[in-house]
Amino acid sequence: MTPKQREALWDSEVARSKAFGWGELPRCNLCRCPVGIGQAWDVSHDGTPKALGGTAVGVAHRKCNREDGHEVTRTVAKVKRQRRRHIGASGPGRGSRPLPCGRNTRWKAKIGGGVEPRLSQGQRLAQTKRIKQVGKQ
Ligand SMILES: [Zn+2]
């Protein structure tokens, strides 16, 4: 953000503070305390983090914003992990090297040893019908 944009943000936050009757100083959007003249401050995302599509920004103490950043980083990473798993982009066996004979491979390992091709549900049903017909004869 350019100094001009930061100045505009500061001015809009001062106007908002005055409108709410909170005084002449902008409020930190994290701790809600006034941000004093000369105090270090950051442009802070208000509500939804930028990494998750948030666009609203406000003024925050630099100390508050940096502390909040640690928590937000962890939360965003978790949200992204959960989403990847939810849509099936990641999860057990979805990596570049799935577990040999795992449930996402074409082969299955038998308990007593040995490997056989993994059949689809329809293929298994057809195989069962064939076995039953042979049994009747
Ligand atoms: Zn603060």
Image: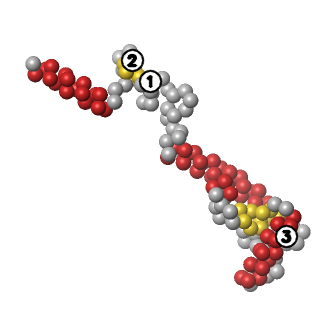
Comparing labels 3 and 1, the label whose residue is closer to the camera: 3
Residue occupying image coordinates x 34% and y 26%:
119
Residue type highlighted by circle 1: Cys
Instruction: Classify mark 2: helix, strand or loop.
Output: strand
What is the crowding at mark 2: few (fewer than 14 residues within 10 Å), some, or many (at least 20)?
few
Image: 4 above or below 118: below
What is the crowding at mark 1: few (fewer than 14 residues within 10 Å), some, or many (at least 20)?
some
The percent coordinates of residue 109 (x first, y second) are 40, 21
Which sits in the foreground, 68 or 117? 117
Residue occupying image coordinates x 24% and y 27%:
126
Q: Which residue is mark 2?
A: 115
Image: 103 above or below 37: above
Q: Residue furthest top?
A: 114
What is the crowding at mark 3: few (fewer than 14 residues within 10 Å), some, or many (at least 20)?
few
Disc 3 to disc 2, C-alpha distance: 69 Å
Residue 101, numbered circle: 1
Residue 75 can be seen in this image: yes
Residue 73, numbered circle: none
Instruction: Classify mark 1: helix, strand or loop.
Output: loop
Label 3 CB sits under 8 Å from any ligand 1 atom: no
Residue type highlighted by circle 2: Val
Left or right, residue 98 beside residue 31? left
Q: Quadrant of residue 32?
A: bottom right
Residue 7, numbered circle: 3
Query: Split into 4 quadrants, where in the image is the N terminus?
Result: bottom right
